Amino acid sequence: MDSIISQFQSAFILGRLFTDNILIAFEINHFLHAPGADGGLSIKLDMAKAFDRVEWPFLFEALGNLGFAVGFISLIKMCISSSSLSFLINRERVGVVRPSRGLRQGDFLSPYLFIMCSEFLSRILARVELNGRILGIAVAPSAPRISHLLFADDTLIFYGANRSEAEAVSHILGTFAAASGLIINFSKSSLMISRSVCDGIASEIVTALGIPRCDSHELYLGVPASVGRNRYASFKFIKDHIWNRIQGWKVKFLSRAGREILIKVVLTSIPAYVMSCFRLPKSLFAEINSILAGF
């Protein structure tokens, strides 16, 4: 997989870390927020039920283009076409439906098949960048230019803030969506444009893409896409998440041992995930410890 999937995809590939995506995205978004930064933008795409919408002909064609043997592709066809769906009505299974597209959730093959499909979006963007139609963002003169980051169906795209590049990216997304069957939910996607771009050009970009503009993407892979001066406010969602989980458990009659297990196994893993990339404020730690002690 490492030899056929581009370096921009970090999901399900041995030796690649999701934290790399998080840190690269954070640096680029911080660069776009900085005053005086070159005109650039960041798009966070929202795929509507991505696994359920993959067209099988596109998948088989993708496998062939990636160099898989005909016999292997035939086995994949048998695996995904043998599935069936039933409806549960009044606790009874009713009817049988044979799907004609999509990848089964929970199947260990599905994530790998999906990233092979999304690899072609990465290759198209890389080729268009090589041809000079779009220009990725470099956070420093000696830094490499980054045009996109992928983690399964989580997609970030970076390029120059001008109408011609916006139209090129819009055409790429439309072509890929039509071929793959994936539907991009533009209303739930977000577009962040650097402060140095004038309002007139920004309006043209928003019109060309059809994506609403935002000051900053809220979260990327479960962590803040950017952190302002008020670090407590940026990471307060961790405390809120822990508080909400505890409120749901309080209605149950849990023993002391049961509560300790939930704290150690479930609740402590919530801040630990974010702490793999960021240092949390001490005041937030104190409040989280107080909530856990009260539980």
Image: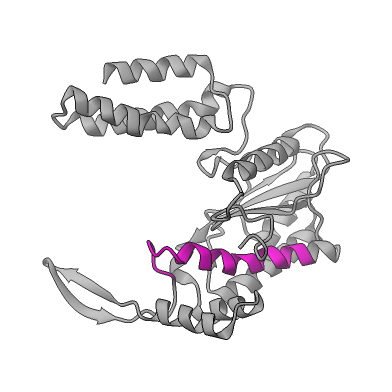
Q: Is residue 89 left or right of residue 113?
A: left
Query: What residue is shown at x 47% (from left), y 30% (from top)?
Result: 272
Q: Which segment is the magenta one?
A: 103-127
Judging depth in this view, the residue of 38 and 150 nearest the camera is 150
Quadrant for the N terminus in the image:
bottom right
Quadrant for the C terminus in the image: top left
On the image, the x and y values in percent for residue 230 come to 59, 22
Q: In this view, does 196 lie above or below 259?
A: below
- Determine the residue positioned at 82% across, 55% down: 135
In the image, residue 256 lies in the stretch drawn in magenta: no
- Residue visible at 33% across and 19% down in the picture: 291
Quadrant assignment, res 84: bottom left
Toward the viewer: 242 or 233? 242
In the displayed structure, 156 sits above or below 279; it is below
Is residue 291 among the parts visible in the rendering?
yes
- Residue 279 at what x, y percent from top left? 57, 24
The residue located at (26%, 25%) in the rendering is: 260
User: Would residue 123 be counted in the magenta stretch?
Assistant: yes
Considering the whole magenta stretch, tell me its main secondary structure. Answer: helix
